[in-house]
Image (cartoon, rainbow, N blue to C red):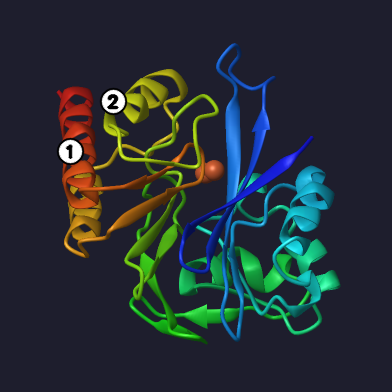
Amino acid sequence: METHIAEIADGIYRLSTYVAEIAPPAGFTFNQFLVLGEEPLLFHTGPRGMFPSVRAAMARVMDPANLRWITFGHVEADECGAMNEWLKVAPRAQVAHGRTGCFVSLNDLADRAPRMLDDGEVIDLGSSKRIRYLDTPHVPHGWEAGLYVEETSGTLLCGDLFTQLGNGPALVSSDIVGPAIAAEDMFKSSSLHPSMGATIRRLADLKPQRLALMHGPSFEGDASAALLALGDYYDRQHQAQAA
Ligand SMILES: [Fe+2]
Ligand SMILES: [Fe+2]
C-alpha cells in the first residue's frame, strides 16, 4: 500500500491511497487532506489499516506530532477510523466536529474530548488559513454529516460528494459530475431525501474555486456549476423514487 501526496492548492495537500481490489477493474481511492498552518488540520483520518501509510506520507510534509486538528465528514471507518491513532501520535491534536456528531458518537468514540462546532463556525489555522464548518445532515449520508471549506483558497473539502471510481490524476478540470453519477448508480451510497438538492445548492453558493474529493481527483474550475448539477441529479433521483 502506497500513499501518494500532491499539493492541490497553496499549503493544501492531498494524500491518496489507491486500492485496486475495491470495485475492480477500476479500483478506488481514499484521500485525506492536510491543511498547513500554525495549527495544521487533517480532513479524514483514513481507516486504521491505512494509518501507517498515511502517517508516512504526512511525515514527508510535516511532523505528524504537530498535527492540531482532526476533522472528517461523518462517522465511518474511512472518514475517521484512525482518529485515535492520530490522537496518540499528536499530543496537541483534537477532533473537531458538529454538535450532532459529538453528542451522538464522538464524545464516546474519541480518546480525548472533541471540540464541538456550530454550523458556520470558523477555526483559524494561522498562516492565512481559515476553515469553516458546515452542517450537511444526511448529505451524502449520516445524520451527523458535515463538510469544511478553506476560505482563503476557496477549497471545499467535499468528502464523499462526487465519489468516483478509478485512480486519476491528483487534480483535474474535466467533468466530475458524470463519473459521480456512474458511481452513485453502482454504490447507491447517498441518503436520498427531499432536502438533499437544496443542501448541495447551498454549497454552490459558496462559489468554491476547487473541490477536494475523498474518492476521486480534486477538481479546479466551475465548482458551483458542478455542485448545482449534482444537486439537480439528486433531486431527480429522489423524485423518481418518491413517484
Ligand atoms: Fe461515507
Ligand atoms: Fe468516504
Residue at image x 38%, y 82%? Answer: 121
Residue at image x 72%, y 65%? Answer: 109
Name which of mark 1 and mark 2 comes first in the sequence. Answer: 2
Residue type marked 2 = Gly
Reply above or below: 228 against 180: below
Image location (x, y in percent) of residue 32:
60, 53
Residue at image x 34%, y 74%? Answer: 151
Q: Nearer the viewer, residue 63 or 230?
A: 63
Reply above or below: 67 against 28: below
Label 1: how many residues lie within 10 Å, few (<14), some (14-19) or many (20+)?
Answer: some
The reply to whether callout 1 and callout 2 are in contact (CB within 8 Å) is no
Q: Nearer the viewer, residue 140 or 21?
A: 21
Residue type marked 1 = Ala
User: Quarter of the image containing the C terminus?
Assistant: top left
User: Quarter of the image containing the N terminus?
Assistant: top right
Can I make out residue 76 in this image?
Answer: no
Reply above or below: 83 against 48: below
Q: Is residue 37 left or right of residue 232?
A: right
Image location (x, y in percent) of residue 6:
57, 51
Judged from the image, the secondary structure of the residue bearing numbered disc 2 is helix
> Does the closest atom of ligand 2 sit within 8 Å of the Cβ of label 1?
no
Mark 1–mark 2 Cα distance, whole angstroms, equals 10 Å
Q: Residue lying farthest top?
A: 25
Label 2: how many residues lie within 10 Å, few (<14), some (14-19) or many (20+)?
Answer: some
| Residue 178 circle label | 2
| Quarter of the rendering containing residue 66 | bottom right
Judged from the image, the secondary structure of the residue bearing numbered disc 1 is helix
Image location (x, y in percent) of residue 50:
77, 45
| Residue 72 circle label | none
Can I make out residue 177 in this image?
Answer: yes
**Which residue, given by chain and number where applicable, does mark 1 sit on?**
229
